[in-house]
Image: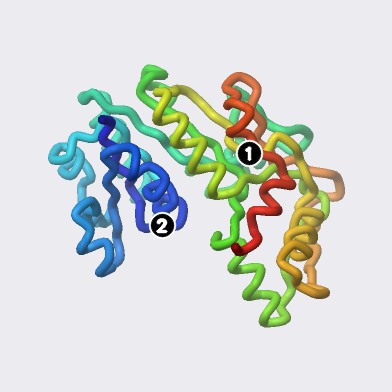
């Protein structure tokens, strides 16, 4: 049975992955802030990347798969990933790194595919690229880079933010000329489950198969949430249409694991 360690399992994405994988694999997680639920759960370990060396936990647990879904200080994250990479080089283990569409945020004229060159204008994008580049120096069977666009779903931070802004009668920021793809938290966790189960390797783009303007997306989400006459603040960061979308070409997932923008929009409804 595969032994999985999710580093950052107390965050939104990490916890969703833990819930998806725990029933099928020997799954463990780390948490940082004090939390009675995690403290009492025998499968969760405290880990503060700014104070501790992750290698100690890796030596004790010996996971066959490590998934990183960390948040926080970029320099501390870089240091943690360097230690993880050194550890998987010396052990029978591999890393699934949750990356971002932002590794391509300098390219604006077309969507990006798995093996396109990365280039970013943002601090966040450049930080993700540093970790990706370190991983790509390893043999391909040692890593998966999972590039993810904006994640939506009924309980996601983005949807909670839209609802909060609406309740406060505050404007919701939209980018009218940015063309994106998206995913839902439920589809994303299923896709990672498949990648784990089938021992996939290399780079995966885990967004919807179709594209949408950011403004249209947020309008449709507000309609689906039945938010009446929301206020939008339109932000134009260029005069032309700009793509920030990650599409698969080389590593396509089975049809049942692909998603569309419409399915993602529908996923924001609460049951």
Q: Residue furthest left?
A: 60
Q: In which quarter of the view is residue 211 placed?
A: top right
SS assignment at label 1: loop
Give yes or no for contact between labels 2 and 1 (Cβ–Cβ under 8 Å): no
Residue at the disc numbered 1: 207
Residue 262 in the image: x percent, y percent? 74, 47
- Kindly identify the residue that appears in the image at 61 percent across and 19 percent down: 250
Q: Residue at x 46, y 40 (%)?
A: 98
Query: Residue most toward the front?
Result: 271
Residue drawn 35% across the image and 23% down it: 142
Residue visible at 23% across and 58% down in the picture: 41
Using a 10 Å C-alpha cutoff, classify the residue at mark 2 as few (fewer than 14 neighbours), some (14 to 19) or many (20 or more).
some
Up/down of 61 relative to 166, above or below: above
- Name above or below for residue 183 compared with residue 85: below
Q: Is residue 75 left or right of residue 223?
A: left
Callout 2: helix, strand or loop?
A: loop
x and y, in percent, of residue 136 in the image: 44, 24
Q: Which label is found at residue 11?
A: 2
- Of residues 5 and 57, the one nearer the viewer is 5
Q: In the image, which disc is placed on residue 128?
A: none
Give residue 180's position: percent from left, percent from top.
Answer: 72, 44
Q: Quadrant of the N terminus?
A: top left
């Amino acid at each position: 049975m595969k032994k999985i360690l999710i580093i950052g399992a107390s965050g939104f994405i990490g916890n969703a992955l833990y819930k998806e994988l725990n029933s099928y694999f020997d799954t463990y997680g780390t948490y940082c802030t004090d939390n009675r639920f995690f403290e009492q759960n025998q499968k969760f370990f405290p880990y503060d990347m700014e104070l501790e060396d992750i290698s100690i936990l890796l030596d004790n647990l010996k996971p066959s798969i490590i998934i990183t879904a960390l948040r926080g200080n970029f320099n501390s994250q870089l240091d943690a990933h360097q230690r993880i990479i050194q550890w998987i080089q010396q052990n029978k283990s591999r890393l699934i790194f949750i990356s971002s569409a932002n590794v391509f945020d300098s390219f604006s004229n077309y969507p990006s595919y798995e093996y396109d060159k990365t280039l970013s204008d943002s601090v966040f994008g450049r930080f993700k690229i540093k970790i990706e580049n370190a991983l790509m120096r390893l043999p391909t069977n040692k890593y998966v880079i999972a590039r993810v666009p904006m994640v939506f779903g009924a309980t996601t931070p983005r949807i909670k933010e839209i609802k909060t802004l609406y309740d406060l009668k505050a404007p919701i920021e939209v980018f009218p000329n940015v063309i994106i793809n998206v995913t839902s938290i439920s589809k994303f966790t299923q896709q990672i489950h498949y990648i784990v189960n089938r021992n996939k390797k290399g780079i995966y783009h885990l967004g919807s198969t179709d594209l949408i303007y950011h403004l249209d997306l947020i309008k449709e989400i507000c309609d689906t949430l039945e938010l009446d006459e929301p206020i939008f603040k339109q932000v134009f960061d260029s005069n032309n249409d700009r793509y920030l979308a990650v599409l698969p070409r080389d590593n396509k997932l089975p049809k049942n694991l692909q998603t569309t923008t419409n399915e993602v929009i529908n996923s924001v409804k609460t049951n």
